[in-house]
Amino acid sequence: MSGGGRGLDAYPERSVAIVRAFQRPLNRALVAGAVVAAFVVLMLVGARADEPFPGTIGIVVVGLLGGLAGLVVAILAVPARVRRAFEAYSWLGHDEVHRFRERTGGPVPTGRAAMDQWLATTPSTPAMRLPRIELLAFVGQFEAARTELDAVPATDPSVRFELAALRQYIDWLEHDSTDVRELGDAARELPVGTIERQAADVTLALVDARIRLVHGDPAWATSLVGIRARLGWAPWRATLLDTWRPVGGLLVLAALIAALVAVVLRSML
């Protein structure tokens, strides 16, 4: 989740610690991709690669090639270890966003103001309680989150695990709790080989990464890197849809603008 207004500064530091950790290498990769996209565009326009195409089609072709080259470089510019950890994190996040939409009938609100508005206008009904708890914890309303958490019945193993995950998350956010015994026990209740157990294992890896990250462990991503190897192609698809597709769109747009400017300048020389 990303914040509007004051951006990530609008949230408690622990809520966004892992987002910040991934944001830095991703931002550097975006800059590297933009530089490469512009360079490729300038080389292609300089070589008049656009001229065999009629009208503005050449500019579009050059822009697309430049943007694609920039996207490839951006992906490769993320250190492999960070990229694997981010893919596991993204796979879990993609599943959570889908679950939120199924439960609420709408998208996850983005930005602190939108989250506060959603919480203010969404009543604490049984159907909405779990989404509300997660958002309440994320924005730092821990007492309210605990009150609603206590009202949710643990009806089956998947719900018990989700409640344990939320309880550990709130305790960690507020009190730096590193106790994951309840969470581990709840995960082991889920049948091995199911998507629920797989998500639980990734959640445990994420919890470990968060704890180690805020305590300054340089190897904080180890658990996420390890779990990534067990997830197959699914994390790559999630990352492609949620991260690299919008990044690619930005790079293509920048490359198209660069191609247009370069062609105009070339015609003036």
Image: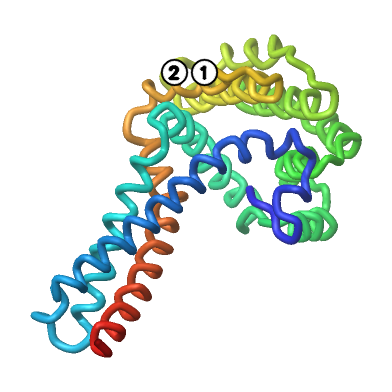
Q: Which mark is residue 119?
A: none
Label 2: state its secondary structure.
helix
Is residue 68 rendered to the left or right of residue 242? left
- Indicate the quadrant containing the C terminus: top left, top right, bottom left or bottom right: bottom left
Image height of 257 relative to 268, above or below: above
The image quarter containing residue 109 is: bottom right
Instruction: Name the residue rendered at 49%, 44% in the picture.
Output: 26
Label 2 crowd bin: few (<14), some (14–19), many (20+), radius 10 Å = some
x, y percentage for residue 63?
28, 70
Label 1 crowd bin: few (<14), some (14–19), many (20+), radius 10 Å = many
Query: Marks 2 and 1, Cα distance to the nearest angstrom?
Result: 5 Å
Instruction: Name the residue rendered at 66%, 56% in the picture.
Output: 110
x, y percentage for residue 244?
40, 51
Residue 46 visible at all: yes
Label 1: state its secondary structure.
helix
x, y percentage for residue 120?
85, 57
Residue 156 visible at all: no
Amino acid type shown at disc 1: Ser
Amino acid type shown at disc 2: Gly
- Residue under pointer 1: 223
* Viewer-side residue, 237 vs 187: 237
Name the residue furthest left: 52
Instruction: Name the residue rendered at 76%, 55% in the picture.
Output: 112
- Residue under pointer 2: 226
Image height of 233 relative to 217, above or below: below
* Viewer-side residue, 106 vs 66: 66
| Dots 2, 1 in contact, CB < 8 A | yes
The image quarter containing residue 131 is: top right
Give the total number of marks visible in the rendering.
Answer: 2
